[in-house]
Image (spheres, rainbow, N blue to C red):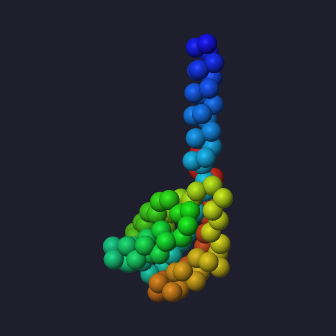
Amino acid sequence: MNKRIAMGLLLLWLSQVALAAGTEYVMRVDGLACPYCAYGVEKKLKAIDGVQKVKVDLDKGLVTVDVKEGTELTDAQMQKLFKDAGFTFRSMTQQAKP
């Protein structure tokens, strides 16, 4: 009986881990110079459904965005978002979150 309970809890935990997985996008952006800039970009990105976490590195000009499984950010979408915010979108890479 205890083995069944343990196995059930393990399967439940594994399913939660799988559901928590998603994608991490790292974008290179020109023009980010101050915390106010970072806040504005963060606010626009968090308005996108499925965005979980945004981190802006002003020194490196990088914006890291974690999204839920099934959420996809496109180059065209990011080019428009950053252009509308007054910044220059340069590139984007993505990788699955561990």
Give the quadrant of residue 12.
top right
Q: Where residue 95 appears, x then y in whole percent?
A: 63, 56
From the viewer's side, name the closer residue of 20 and 28.
Answer: 20
Q: Position of residue 67 (x, y in %)?
A: 56, 59
Q: On the rendered structure, is 18 left or right of 51?
A: right
Considering only vertical position in the picture, is 10 above or below 92?
A: above
Identify the residue shown where x is 58% and y is 76%.
78
Above or below, 8 against 88 in this view is above
* Residue farthest toward the top in the current orientation of the protein: 1
Q: Is residue 62 visible?
A: no
Q: Quadrant of the C terminus?
A: top right
Residue found at the very far front of the displayed protein: 1
Quarter occupied by the N terminus: top right
Number of marks: 0
Q: Is residue 39 visible?
A: yes
> Where residue 5 appears, x then y in whole percent?
59, 20
Q: Nearest the camera: 64 or 9? A: 9
Task: Name the residue: 65% across, 79% down.
Answer: 76
| x 63%, y 23%: residue | 7
Q: Is residue 71 above or below residue 5?
A: below
Residue at x-position 61% and y-position 46%: 19
Nearest to the observer: residue 68 or residue 33: 68
